[in-house]
Image (spheres, helix red, strand yellow):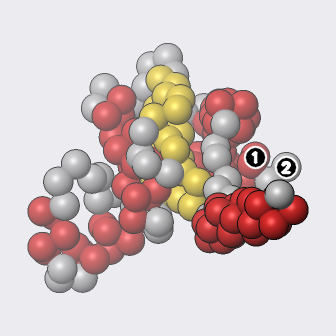
Amino acid sequence: MLRSIGVAVVLAAALALPDQEAAAQLKEKKVLTLAAAQKMIAAAQAEAERNHIAGVIAVCDDGGWPILVLRMDNAAFIASVELAPGKARTAALFKKPSQALEDAINHGRTAAVTARGFVEMQGGLPIVVDGQVIGGIGASFATPEDDVKIANAGLAALTE
């Protein structure tokens, strides 16, 4: 009987070991919350209003799926409703500013235009926390400079 209990304890410990090893192989993942997206959008909108410009601001998760999209009254372009989320998605999935794709195209890598479903224009920035890309923010206003300025204002709000 004592031997049976001993074998059962050793067997139970052996079975638990793979679970512990598997858990050790998993990495904790940062996740962008709705509250964080709202904070970023609010800051970006405030920056746009200070500059008397209107457009669209979008935040997506690390998979490129929209969390929040804001279309301001009198947005510069109707197309911005597609462009801002596309810029956010591009930045999140490529893990770099969407401008990097625009620059690649402008410097002769014309094959980059074949990246279907991505927006190769300035105004999309990856959201990076502790070295992990957890999403993207995109802005579409009247000029590329405005797009980057507004996206940066939203990004800065995450660290405040």
Q: Position of residue 77 (x, y in %)?
A: 33, 30
Tell me if residue 11 comes above or below residue 140 in the rendering.
below
Q: Position of residue 125 (x, y in %)?
A: 52, 57
| Depth order, front residue of 18/150 | 18
Task: Using a 10 Å C-alpha cutoff, classify the residue at mark 1 as few (fewer than 14 neighbours), some (14 to 19) or many (20 or more).
Answer: some
Q: Which residue is mark 2?
A: 160
Look at 59% across and 46% down and name the residue there.
150
Tell me if residue 11 comes above or below residue 48 in the rendering.
below
Q: Amino acid at mark 1?
A: Ala
| Helix, strand or loop at mark 1 | helix
Q: Which residue is mark 1?
A: 157
Look at 42% across and 39% down and name the residue there.
65
Q: Amino acid at mark 2?
A: Glu
| Depth order, front residue of 21/100 | 21
Q: Residue furthest top?
A: 73
Res. 14 in view:
yes
Look at 17% across and 54% down and name the residue there.
116
Q: In which image quadrant can residue 15 be found? A: bottom right
Q: Tell me: 125 left or right of 10.
A: left
Find out whether the residues at labels 1 and 2 contact each other: C-beta distance under 8 Å.
yes
| C-alpha span from label 1 to label 2 | 5 Å
Q: In which image quadrant can residue 13 be found? A: bottom right
